[in-house]
């Protein structure tokens, strides 16, 4: 298990990258708790691979408090949609 603080040793921007990705996913009514998609986004933009398991603090209490229930982690969404998140 890891935390964002530990992941920041390899990628100091991981928390900001995650927050940006999470917000964009939610705005598009896409699952903002899908670690596989987050990981794909982070590596697509050239950052180090954060690993195949989400950090223990992946979905923080602040996000849970402001997000409607019902989000489910899925890995069925095509990566081509993810790539549009990284485009300006």
Image: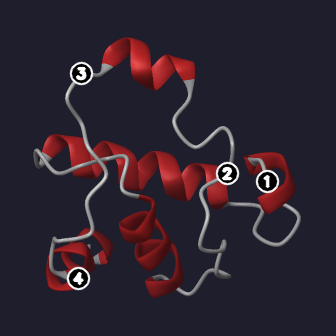
Q: 77 above or below 46?
A: above
Q: Residue at x 58, y 43 (%)?
A: 58
Can you identify the residue that label 4 sits on?
79
Q: How many marks?
A: 4
Residue 85 in the image: state x and y as whole percent: 26, 69
Assess whether mark 2 and mark 1 are in contact (beta carbons under 8 angstroms): yes
- Mark 3 vs 1: CB contact within 8 A: no
- Residue drawn at x 41%, y 74% is 41
Task: Work out whether mark 2 precedes mark 4 in sequence or the reverse, and give the earlier one.
Answer: 2
Sequence order check, earlier mark of 4 and 1: 1
User: Mark 1 vs mark 2: which is more N-terminal?
Assistant: 1
Dot 2 alpha-carbon crowd within 10 angstroms: few under 14, some 14 to 19, many 20 or more: some
| SS label for mark 2 | loop
Mark 1, other Cα within 10 Å: few <14 / some 14–19 / many ≥20: some
Secondary element under disc 4, as helix, strand or loop, is helix
> What numbered label is drawn on residue 2?
1
Relative horizontal placement of residue 36, taking residue 15 as reference (left or right) = left
Residue at 26% in and 43% down: 72
**Mark 4 and mark 3 in contact (Cβ < 8 Å)?**
no
Q: Quadrant of the N terminus?
A: bottom right
Label 3, secondary structure: give it: loop
Residue 57 in percent (x, y) is at: 66, 38
Give residue 5's position: percent from left, percent from top: 83, 47
Point 74% across, 49% down: residue: 4
Q: Secondary structure at mark 1?
A: loop
Q: CA distance from mark 3 to mark 1?
A: 25 Å
């Amino acid at each position: 298990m890891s935390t964002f603080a530990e992941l920041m040793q390899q990628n100091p921007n991981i928390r900001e990258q995650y927050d940006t990705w999470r917000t964009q996913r939610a705005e598009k009514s896409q699952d903002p708790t899908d670690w596989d998609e987050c990981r794909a986004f982070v590596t697509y933009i050239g950052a180090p691979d954060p690993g195949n398991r989400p950090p223990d603090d992946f979905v923080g209490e602040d996000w849970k408090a402001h997000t409607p229930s019902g989000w489910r982690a899925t890995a069925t969404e095509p990566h081509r949609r993810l790539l549009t998140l990284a485009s300006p």
